[in-house]
Amino acid sequence: MDVLISGITGLIGRALAGQLATAGHRVAGLSRARGTDNLHWDPETGELDVAQLEGFDAVVHLAGESIASGRWTASKKAHILDSRVRGTRLLAEALAKLPQPPSVLVVASAIGYYGHRPGEELDEASAPGDGFLAEVCRQWEAAADPAREAGMRTVHSRFGMVLSPKGGALKPLLLTARLGLAGPIGHGKQVWSWVALDDVAGALVHILSTPGLAGPVNLVGPTPIAQREFAATLASVLRRPAVMPLPAFAARLVLGQMADELLLPSQQVRPAKLDASGYPFRFPELEPALQAMLAAA
């Protein structure tokens, strides 16, 4: 396949491009940076040459403002929402104008769609939740409607907590764990739905090549885990203690609303569609996943 990836320089974009290239596919990037080998666009100004999108079999849209960098001020939250909705709509509308559009468009989303749902097991049929991230995800996914209406198979990959020592959620957790500070956050009973970066890229390749997958697809591993168990497992792999708790009020003091939507909510999410379509997880269990990641780091 000829695959176009926006956000190709990010953590997931690099991993996906590597797996696609290894499998023999041709990969191109869509980037705001000029003077590179990537195709150029600018979602903020609406700059996108439709003609340069011709000839691709698949498009994976990963670009968007990071949700984990900096406190969620009003302007930061507006930029998080706008970067996702505006970029997705611009790309979807451009692809819909092509005489021969790609057969599939995969757009990033997140399990933040489900909100804080303690005690529930969630799959792709579950209703949306409440909160800022849930609203972002609803609008983000709806922004791809022009592609769907043009007949493209459109997939919303709802990412869980992506684990890699190179970035994402694991990098800051590793820092605190190595200092012996990786204890429970809040009461520690909240369920974290995680996925190894290798499985993120592998599942995206699987989605591209599986025509029956469309709509929301939960991109999480099969074994969600309570946060206190996550912390204990990470500490054990690093051979460090995990006794220093981070009270909920302290997390909120440091991170504000981000703590309530990223660290403290409980989301027990199942990869129902990936399981049903036969995707073989490389790292279904947390401890072997962490051991493999840290050995390769």
Image (spheres, rainbow, N blue to C red):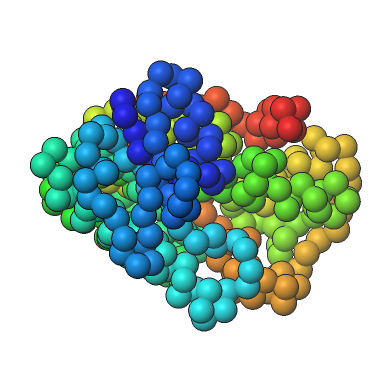
Instruction: Identify the residue at the far bottom of this view.
Output: 74
Look at 66% across and 56% down and name the residue there. Answer: 189
Residue at far left of view: 99
The residue positioned 60% from the left and 69% from the top of the image is 258
Picture quadrant where residue 67 is located: bottom right
Q: Residue furthest front?
A: 35
Q: Nearer the viewer, residue 279 or 7?
A: 7
Question: How many marks on residues?
Answer: 0
Is residue 116 left or right of 148 when viewed as pictured? right
Is the residue 224 above or below the residue 32 in the image? above
Q: Residue at x 47, y 53 (%)?
A: 33
Q: In this rendering, does residue 102 appear at all?
A: yes
Q: Quadrant of residue 237?
A: top right
Picture coordinates of residue 125 (x, y %)? 31, 49
Instruction: Judge whether 202 appears above or below 235 on screen.
Output: above
The N terminus lies in which quarter of the figure?
Answer: top left
> Compared with residue 29, is residue 186 higher up or lower down, i.e. above or below?
below
User: Looking at the image, which is closer to me, 16 or 27?
Assistant: 27
Q: Position of residue 266 (x, y in %)?
A: 56, 58
Is residue 193 in view from this perspective?
no
Residue 25: x and y in percent read 38, 23
Q: As drawn, is 274 to the left or to the right of 105?
A: right
User: Which x, y percent locates residue 122?
Assistant: 42, 50
Q: What residue lies at 45% left-to-right and 39% top-to-bottom?
A: 37
Quadrant occupied by the C terminus:
top right
